[in-house]
Image (cartoon, grey):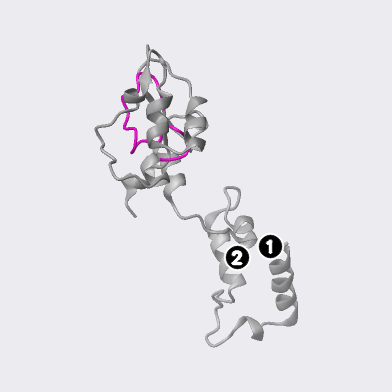
Amino acid sequence: MDTRKECERHIFWKIGKGDVSFWWDNWTNKGALANLIEQSSRSKKILVSDFIVHDTWNLDKLNDLLPSYLVTHIQTISISPQNEDYPIWTPDPSGSFSSKSAWNALRTHRITALTHTKIWHNKMPFKISFSVLRLLKDKLAIDSPGLRSTDLPDVVVVTIVLLKQIIIF
């Protein structure tokens, strides 16, 4: 995974003066325009400001390069030429970047099993959580060599089965 490219997908640029790349920065909130349409020349030197005239969009220039649905969308984007462009980090509701939000945005999320959420939590001591996990996997250490949980007295087996059911539900 190219981390930089992955992170850039989550950055949205709020347009001020328009000093961001027209083709390669996400300023439309649809991703980089270069990835949305086929175009022969996609220079990084072309800026959004090249398509702004007197604080409004230059529709003729936009229509020459982009399909009409994108031009229509771009017309809804407000321009603030007195302000600088600024990035918004989309995974965080505040728009501010943090390592935590980047980690959550980039990591591969696994489905959490219900049993794990009941075993592993802050209110359960680690030793107990670990013992319960071993119990569920039938790997609980027993003092007698060669004795398995299936060889235990019936009352203990019933207790283990009940504990497993309580943990699962």
Query: Camera-side residue: 62 or 73?
Result: 62
Q: Position of residue 15 (x, y in %)?
A: 40, 23
- Residue 27 in the image: x percent, y percent? 41, 32
Could you say which quadrant of the image residue 45 lies in? top left
Label 2, secondary structure: give it.
helix
Q: Mark on residue 48?
A: none
Quadrant the N terminus occupies: bottom left
Q: How many marks?
A: 2
Q: Nearer the viewer, mark 2 or mark 1?
A: 1
Please tell me whether residue 26 belongs to the stretch shown in magenta.
yes
Q: Which residues are magenta?
A: 14-31
Query: What residue lies at 60% left-to-right and 52% top-to-bottom?
Result: 124
Q: Quadrant of residue 149?
A: bottom right
Q: Which amino acid, by three-letter code, is at mark 1?
A: Ile
Which label's residue is closer to the chain start, 2 or 1?
2
Label 1 crowding class (10 Å Cα cut-off): few <14, some 14-19, many 20+? some
Asked if the stretch drawn in magenta spans residue 29, the answer is yes
Q: Main secondary structure of the magenta part?
A: loop
Image quarter of the C terminus:
bottom right
Q: Residue at x 46, y 39 (%)?
A: 67
Q: Which residue is mark 2?
A: 132
Residue 161 occupies quadrant: bottom right
Q: Are marks 2 and 1 in contact (CB under 8 Å)?
A: yes
Instruction: Provide residue 91's location: percent of width, then percent of height.
Output: 48, 38
For this orientation, the residue located farthest to the bottom is 146
